Image (cartoon, grey):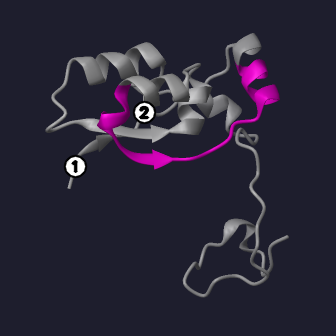
């Protein structure tokens, strides 16, 4: 098992320089990266660059696609993630289920079906 750090918007490790500093100043035997593609993009980072330069330190990938219009609004208005996340930040992924999974009691919107 490898410890991975999950950079997140509005946290101590959000921007690409902060992620690079973490990886450059830590030991890969003990600290690696959970590459959250959405939060890296939100922080203005370059996911592909991080993969190219630090691929051996990526222990887990959390794939999200951020809405470019939202990212532009965040930059233009200098919005925090907390203020912006009251609206959607990530692009919605298609849902393929039609009924609420029995194992997930708090299905988003508590809706009985997905579309």
Residue 77 screen position, x and y as percent: 74, 14
Q: Which residues are magenta?
A: 54-74
Q: Which of pointers 2 and 1 indicates the residue nearer the eye? A: 1
- In the picture shown, does residue 64 fall above or below 68? below
User: Residue most toward the front?
Assistant: 52
Relative to 36, say whether 18 is above or below.
above
Q: Secondary structure at mark 1?
A: loop
Q: Residues within 10 Å of mark 1 (few under 14, many from 20)?
A: some
**Mark seen at residue 85:** none
Picture residue at 80% right of the left edge, 79% below the top: 113
Upstream in sequence: badge 2 or badge 1: 1
Residue 14, position in %: x, y? 46, 24
Q: Nearer the viewer, residue 106 or 36?
A: 36
Q: Dot 2 surroundings within 10 Å: few (below 14), some, or many (20 or more)?
A: many
> Dividing the picture into quarters, in which one does residue 79 lie?
top right
Which quadrant holds residue 5? top left
- Name the residue rendered at 78%, 20% in the picture: 73
Residue visible at 77% across and 19% down in the picture: 72
Residue lying at 42% horizontally and 33% vertically, measured from the top left: 7
Indicate yes or no whether the magenta region holds residue 47.
Answer: no
Query: Where residue 48 sits in the image (x, y, percent)?
Result: 53, 28
Q: Secondary structure at mark 2?
A: loop
Q: Quadrant of residue 75?
A: top right
Q: Which residue is mark 1?
A: 2
Q: Is residue 72 magenta?
A: yes
Q: Which residue is denoted by mark 2 in the rendering?
A: 7
Quarter of the image that includes the C terminus: bottom right
Residue toward you, 92 or 54: 54
User: Count of labels shown?
Assistant: 2
């Amino acid at each position: 098992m490898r410890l991975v750090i999950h950079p997140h918007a509005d946290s101590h490790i959000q921007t690409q320089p902060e992620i690079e500093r973490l990886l450059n100043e830590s030991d890969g035997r003990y600290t690696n990266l959970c590459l959250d593609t959405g939060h890296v993009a939100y922080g203005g980072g370059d996911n592909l660059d991080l993969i190219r330069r630090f691929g051996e330190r990526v222990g887990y990938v959390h794939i999200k696609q951020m809405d470019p219009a939202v990212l532009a609004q965040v930059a233009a208005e200098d919005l925090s993630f907390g203020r912006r996340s009251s609206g959607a930040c990530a692009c919605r992924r298609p849902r393929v289920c039609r009924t609420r999974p029995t194992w997930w009691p708090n299905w988003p919107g508590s809706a009985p079906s997905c579309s």
